[in-house]
Amino acid sequence: MKPQFVERELTPEGPRRRSGLSPRGRRVTVNLAESPLSWLHARGHLDDRLSAAGECLRRDYERAAISPRVTMRWDAVRITGTGEAGLDPTERQIAARSRFDGAMEAAGSGLTDILWRVVCAGEALTVAEKALDWPMRSGKLVLRIALERVAKFYRIP
C-alpha cells in the first residue's frame, strides 16, 4: 500500500483532523494508509508472529467479501479452465469465509469484538476501546491474547 502522508496539528487528544494548522502548534506527519495493526507492529507492540496472524485474518475477511457491498459485483465471468488452483471465485470466497469463521471461533467469545474492529474494520485501538466501553489501554492486551489464538489457528510458528 502506498503511503499517504499528511501534516496534522498535534493536540493533547491526538492529531487534529482539520486541515488548518495553527502557526504555533506542534505538528506531526501521519500516514493515512497505515492500518492500526501495522501501526502497532511498527512501534513494537506486536511481534512478527502476531502481526502475521492479524494479516492472515484480514486477508481472509477481505477474500470472503464479508463487508457490505455498495454496488453489484463486476467480476469477470469465469471461462472454463481458467481457475486458480482449481477453485472458482465463489469457491475461494467460501474457503476464505470458512477460515475466517474458524479463526474467530478459535479466538473465543469476548475476543472477537476487538479482532473484528481493529483487524478487519481498521478502527484505531482507542476508538475500539471506547465503542466496547473498555478501560483505556486495555484493548492492546486483549488484542494480543486474541491474536495469539488466531496465530495458533493459522499455525504460524
Image (cartoon, rainbow, N blue to C red):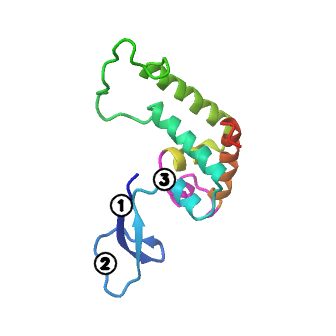
Q: Of the numbered discs in the image, which one, if any, rests on residue 34?
A: none
Q: Splitting the image into 4 quarters, where does residue 55 fall?
A: top right
Name the residue that disc number 2 marks: 21
Indicate the quadrant containing the C terminus: top left, top right, bottom left or bottom right: top right
Measured in 3D between alpha carbons, the distance from the residue under mark 1 to the one under mark 2, in whole angstroms, is 18 Å
Q: Amino acid at mark 1?
A: Gln
Measured in 3D between alpha carbons, the distance from the residue under mark 3 to the one under mark 2, in whole angstroms, is 25 Å
Magenta span has 130? yes
Q: Splitting the image into 4 quarters, where does residue 126 fall?
A: bottom right
Magenta span has 72? no
Name the residue that disc number 1 marks: 4
Question: Which stretch did the figure color magenta?
Answer: 121-137
Image vertical order of residue 92 relative to residue 57, above or below: above
SS for dot 2? loop
Q: Tell me where residue 33 appears, x and y as whole percent.
A: 40, 56
Q: Amino acid at mark 2?
A: Leu
Name the residue that disc number 3 marks: 123
